[in-house]
Image (cartoon, helix red, strand yellow):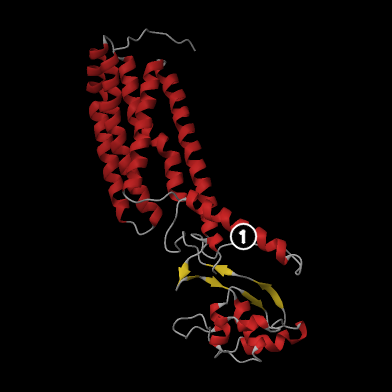
Amino acid sequence: KTDPEYNGLIKRKNGVREVYCFVEEMAAFNANNGVNDCDYVKDGEWKNVTWQVDPEDLPDLMESFLNKNQTSCFDDRGRELISARYSNEIGWDGSSMKYAAIAVESAGLSPFGQDRAPIIRNEYDKFVEIAKEADEVISQYCSGSVIMTDLDQKFINMNNQSVYVQTAIQSAILGVVIAFVVLLLSTRVFHLAFFACLSIGSVLASVIGTMVMIGWSLGSIESILIGILAGFSVDYVVHLAHAYEVAEGDTNARITEAFSDLGISVFNGMITSVGASIPLFFCQLQFFGKFGIFLCLTIVFSWIFANFGFMSLLAQFKIPIKKRCFSF
């Protein structure tokens, strides 16, 4: 509770670290002949006498120690029962002690929100080191090994976040690569496929950035949506790329013809898709609500970058197209 080695790791309360260790109260209770004296517990006088419990006396001691009216000395209000305060730390099944635990409250992790994986990893590694130190001592007297875990499942969430990030990145990259191959096969012009993938990459960055701005955190739903984002983004740009490729004339003529042939169709497709996504905004199920917002953002950004990004690149660079530059 007072070791400076754990500064910044364990939360402080009333000047000492928040540690849940039932042995303090149980040892004092046993040393004081079954009398619960909080002053005796807190000043540590019980450490100067024989407080260890004989295994044969443990059932009787635990029955009185976990008495329904026995309150904890470390509760500021004096109302919390010992059985409630140490419900996760005492592994008593009524006849034997299955496990004993010490719990601490982290100074860096909040039980009411989701922390980023690097922050949780830093806390996790520090607590693992504490568990290893405890194991070296406890293993000399007890069977089994020390297991470190968290009651709020923060460490599980840390691992899940790593999986979500890895899955989202791999899926997004794979989607862009597949889109490039499809565009190259459909247009048979390298710079069209390349510029189209730049447009798709811009949509990826814009949608993910907007998701962060509106307060979404990376979870299973968001990871899945990012994975399918490239596939949703390719629709409008591939239509314009194909229309540009089959058109005749120089760059300006091709752009004019592409917009004349498919510009209105692409615009109408965007309007209908956005309109179809709006009812999903009002769904009570989280997945459908988020999918509606995601679909709307993806469609809008795809249309913007296809019309004003992709076509502007073609107009700016004016790279000529030679018919049959690829043979398949």
Q: Residue at x 29, y 51 (%)?
A: 279
The spot of residue 57 in percent (x, y) is: 74, 87
Q: Amino acid at mark 1?
A: Ile
The reply to whether residue 239 is visible in this rendering is yes
Residue 146 visible in the shown view: no
Residue 194 higher or lower than 248, as above or below: below
Q: Counting other residues with Cα less than 10 Å from the Cα at mark 1, is it few (<14), some (14-19), or many (20 or more)?
A: some
| Secondary structure beneath label 1 | helix
**The quadrant where residue 24 appears:** bottom right
> In the rendered view, does 18 fall on the left or right side of 285?
right
Q: How many marks?
A: 1
Q: Relative to 89, does residue 68 appear above or below in the rendering? A: below
Is residue 111 positioned above or below 300 on the image? below
Q: Nearer the viewer, residue 42 or 273?
A: 42
Q: Position of residue 8 (x, y in %)?
A: 48, 59
Q: Is residue 237 above or below residue 89?
A: above
Q: Residue at x 50, y 36 (%)?
A: 170
In the rendered image, residue 278, in percent from the top left (x then y), is placed at: 28, 49
Residue plotted at (76% across, 69% down):
141
Q: Quadrant of residue 246?
A: top left
Q: Residue at x 32, y 43 (%)?
A: 210
287 or 75: which is nearer to us? 75
Q: Is residue 26 left or right of residue 7?
A: right
Quarter holding the N terminus? bottom right
Q: Nearer the viewer, residue 244 or 113?
A: 113
The residue at which mark 1 appears reads as 130
Q: Nearer the viewer, residue 295 or 108?
A: 108
Residue 112 location (% of width, % of height): 42, 63
